[in-house]
Image (cartoon, grey):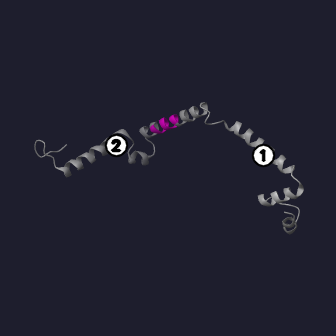
Amino acid sequence: MPHEARNQYDVGRCLAWYIRYLHAQMNRSGITEEERNSGVNLRVERHRLMKITADLAELELNERLGKLIPISVYEKLLIGWAVTIRQRVLSLPAVCRTCWWDLTGAPSRTSSTARAATC
């Protein structure tokens, strides 16, 4: 750190020195803009590999803790919901079923004016 004399420091020069120091620390510890933009670089690729490995480990941990479920389990659950909704809609009387189809935008065999009168 630059100083004028013993225990006397110029604030402007010290601030500029400290900013350069912090900038150099960031460049040493991380990846510079040039390295990010250059394409292939061993440090960049190593950094990407470490990040991907950490992300995969985090996903595995969340799955083990029960915060995530496999996609196959979710698909079975979703199919079960769809079957239940379909069965309940089909068990409705025909008038209600027609109104429900109108709300969802599904095509119907009757005209829209006749449906509106029954709903």
Does 32 sit left or right of 8 as displayed?
Answer: right
Is tag 2's residue or tag 1's residue first in the polypeptide sequence? 2
Does 52 sit left or right of 106 as displayed?
Answer: left
Start and end of the magenta stretch? 47-54
Does 35 sit left or right of 58 as displayed?
Answer: left
Disc 2 target residue: 27
Q: Position of residue 118 (x, y in %)?
A: 87, 64
Q: Residue at x 16, y 49 (%)?
A: 10
Q: Amino acid at mark 1?
A: Ala
Say which of 57 and 29 sits in front. 57
Q: Amino acid at mark 2?
A: Asn
Q: Residue at x 45, y 38 (%)?
A: 47
Residue that sits furthest to the top in the current view: 64
Q: Secondary structure at mark 1?
A: helix
Is 55 situated above or below 87?
Answer: above
Q: Residue at x 49, y 36 (%)?
A: 49
Q: Quadrant of residue 93?
A: bottom right
Q: Quadrant of residue 96?
A: bottom right
